[in-house]
Amino acid sequence: MKLRSAFKLLGLLMALIVIVILVAQLYSTRTIAPMGDQIDRNPAGPGVFRIAFGSCNKQWKPNYMWRAIVNCKPDLWIWLGDSIDAATEDMGYLRSQYEKQKKNPGYAELRKRCPIIGTWDDNDYGMKNGTRHYVKKIESQQLFLDFIDEPKDSPRRKQEGVYASYVYGKPGNRIKIILLDLRYNADEPGSESDLLGEKQWQWLEYELRDSRDDIVLLGSSIQMLSHEHPYEHWNNYPKSRERMLQLLTAVKPKLTIILSGDRHLAEISKWDDPRLPYPLYDVTSSGLTHHVDYFYHLRACFSPEKNRYRAAKLFCEKNFSVIDIGLSKTYSTVDLQIRDQENAIQRKMHVALN
């Protein structure tokens, strides 16, 4: 009788624990409106080119971030993937979700204020953890390019993938933004697998060799440096990761900064490679409408996420990032910022380059 009562009590206790965990999970994924005015209290100074970027946006959830981003007065917005969440083979549905996002009042205001460029990740590509085997990738590419207002006669519409490059500034004092496509040509992960496809590799090498005197922002929808976690990252394709790092160290642009997304958290990673004359940074910004949940934090209590390259503490709330690039003929400064939906700077790094 006592044993039966003990088992009953244990069952009730386990049920209570499950209920508490589920409630905590629901609480952790709730949407909270900003508490303040979202004013930018760290405006860009004279002669600064300001870039804002982010990733991981669920088009059906309230997004309070747009007002903060607009208040930052960026010269450019970059999507780093998952501009919508719509993994599907139904192109009618995918189109409707892009249209829904474009009608978001805050995003519509940003579109009026600055140019928007971007690349995709799996949830706007249309296939969860998508690879080259996605059967609707040709149609999906056109819908994504429609979403970011790519001209109908753009060469980008005829290539295999959405990779692209953009140049801002004058010769000798330029910023080059290179956006990679890590989905269209990707193999399944593996030690010998390829992430970019040979055509994109050849294009990338040309773009980098044409950028020796430029500050290069390399847009990668997944993290390149951090790889000690069980999620998507470049080291799931170790041969491709090593090829990329060898290419960067061989070409040596004036400065290279990696921009990444995907993780539903933000962090800045830094790698001091002796083959480069500067540290290589990877700025991760994700997500705009949601962040890591209670289960992530519960696991972290027992096994905290490692990153040997982490330069500042993880930021696990909703976020976007700002990069301020001050240019002169002899001196460049780059400020890397991770901001919350209140528009407050939560993490930052300063890079000076003679």
Image: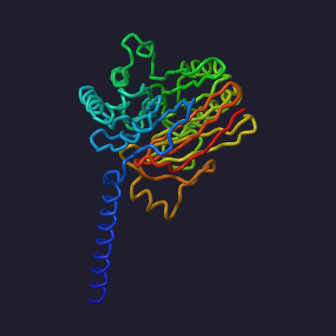
User: Residue at 46% across / 34% down in the picture?
Assistant: 80
**In this rendering, is residue 134 above or below 59?**
above
Task: Estimate the x, y position of residue 264 in percent, counting from the top left.
Answer: 43, 47
Q: Residue at x 60, y 49 (%)?
A: 310
Residue 249 placement (x, y as % from top left): 70, 30
**Side of 124 where 91 appears, left or right:** left
The image quarter containing residue 207 is top right
- Across and down, in percent, residue 62 comes to 29, 44
Residue positioned 46% across, 36% down in the render: 53
| Image quadrant occupied by the N terminus | bottom left
Query: Which of the pair 123/57 is nearer the observer?
Result: 57
Residue 84, placed above or below residue 349:
above
Residue 4, given in percent of the width and then of the height, sits at 27, 84
Answer left or right for 250 relative to 91: right
Q: Is residue 308 above or below residue 165?
A: below
Q: Which residue occupies the extreme front position in the image?
A: 46
